[in-house]
């Protein structure tokens, strides 16, 4: 714990739960909230990793702010409810950040209903579980702020990523509705739309599309670079804190300007992975035969 006191910091006395808190974006968000005085609880399925990161954060915590951790699965209601209780205690919960999400690059005609549904569950159901668990604790606190990570492609077509696009669009529809439903309780629910972020969880995340450099992504990004977790952490901190007290049901885009253009063309990567015959069959509107 640092010698700096949290007493004069803008989030002093606030409690925060970060779901997916051991990840690149989640970890950066936890660090930003902690630096401004919030007591932070981080949740992840990987107990060893989350414990190590919590210990690291504890050394950075201003006096008066605490760091806790709890292992759990974002899709299991009991796990998330336990995490909320662990973070909030009797006083209630002020902030919840969820960075849960997953997507795959799979042509729709090669996908199956189970895989497609799993992407919807990870991106939408996890948010539903978090909202349901957090609302009573935030109502008890007199209000609160929830921040979810969506994606720029929630509002942008990305061929061969139909499950992820649908999942993030579904997340945003849920956020709009929940923000309307719980606004009278002083509970704000918002989303961040990141672009492509290069994080420790996803090293050189775009490299597989273009070899050593994510050229196709950078060509569609006016600011000319991939994001890093701290780019998103600033937006998390803004939406979590009092500076955004009149914002709810909205979506903050932090993507280097990628939303101004189009999704990159990944067809060449698919041809390398699947072969020309499979891709040509898909482009003709036929389902390739599986070997």
Image (cartoon, rainbow, N blue to C red):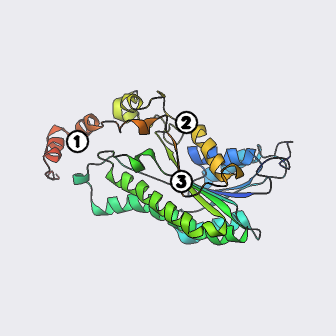
Question: Which is in the foreground here, disc 1 or disc 2?
Answer: 2
Whichever of callouts 1 and 2 sits on the residue coming sooner in the sequence is 2
Horizontally, residue 248 falls left or right of residue 223, namely right
How far apart are labels 3 and 1 at the CA level? 39 Å
Question: Which is in the foreground here, disc 3 or disc 1?
Answer: 3
Q: Secondary structure at mark 1?
A: helix
Judge the density around disc 3: few (<14), some (14-19), many (≥20) Cα neighbours within 10 Å.
some
Q: Which residue is mark 2?
A: 228
Q: Which residue is mark 3?
A: 250
Whichever of callouts 3 and 1 sits on the residue coming sooner in the sequence is 3
Q: Quadrant of residue 137?
A: bottom right
Q: Secondary structure at mark 3?
A: loop
Q: Which circle marks residue 173 in the picture? A: none
Residue nearest the viewer, comparing 240 with 126: 240
Residue 134 in view in this figure: no
Q: Position of residue 183 (x, y in %)?
A: 61, 66
Judge the density around disc 1: few (<14), some (14-19), many (≥20) Cα neighbours within 10 Å.
few
Residue nearest the viewer, comparing 160 with 254: 254
Judge the density around disc 2: few (<14), some (14-19), many (≥20) Cα neighbours within 10 Å.
some
Q: Position of residue 12 (x, y in %)?
A: 80, 53
Whichever of callouts 2 and 3 sits on the residue coming sooner in the sequence is 2
Q: Which circle marks residue 274 in the picture? A: 1
Q: Are marks 1 and 2 in contact (CB under 8 Å)?
A: no
How far apart are labels 1 and 2 at the CA level? 30 Å
Q: Secondary structure at mark 2?
A: loop
The image shows residue 258, relative to residue 219, as above or below, that is: below
Residue 247 in view in this figure: yes
Q: Are marks 3 and 1 in contact (CB under 8 Å)?
A: no
Residue at the (50%, 61%) spot, across then down? 176
Q: Residue furthest front?
A: 246
Q: Position of residue 89 (x, y in %)?
A: 74, 68
């Amino acid at each position: 714990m640092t010698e700096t006191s949290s007493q004069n910091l803008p989030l002093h006395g606030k409690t925060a739960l970060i779901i997916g808190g051991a990840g690149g974006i989640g970890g950066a968000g936890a660090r930003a909230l902690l630096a401004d005085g919030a007591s932070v609880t981080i949740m992840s399925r990987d107990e060893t990793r989350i414990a190590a990161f919590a210990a690291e954060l504890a050394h950075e915590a201003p006096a008066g702010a605490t760091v806790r951790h709890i292992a759990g699965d974002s899709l299991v209601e009991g796990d998330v409810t336990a995490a909320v209780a662990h973070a909030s205690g009797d006083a209630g919960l002020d902030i919840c950040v969820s960075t849960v999400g997953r997507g795959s690059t799979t042509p729709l005609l090669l996908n199956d209903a189970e895989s497609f549904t799993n992407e919807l569950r990870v991106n939408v159901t996890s948010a539903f579980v978090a909202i349901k668990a957090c609302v009573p604790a935030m109502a008890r606190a007199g209000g609160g702020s929830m921040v979810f990570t969506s994606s720029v492609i929630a509002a942008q077509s990305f061929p061969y990523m139909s499950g992820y696009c649908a999942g993030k669009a579904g997340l945003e529809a849920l956020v709009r509705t929940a923000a309307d439903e719980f606004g009278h309780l002083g509970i704000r629910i918002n989303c961040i739309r990141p672009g492509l972020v290069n994080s420790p969880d996803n090293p050189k995340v775009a490299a597989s599309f273009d070899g050593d450099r994510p050229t196709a992504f950078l060509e569609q990004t006016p600011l000319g670079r991939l994001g890093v977790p701290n780019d998103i952490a600033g937006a998390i901190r803004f939406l979590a804190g009092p500076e955004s007290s009149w914002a709810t049901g909205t979506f903050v885009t932090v993507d280097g300007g990628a939303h101004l253009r189009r999704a990159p063309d990944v067809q060449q990567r698919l041809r390398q992975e699947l072969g020309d015959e499979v891709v040509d069959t898909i482009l003709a509107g036929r389902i390739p035969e599986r070997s």
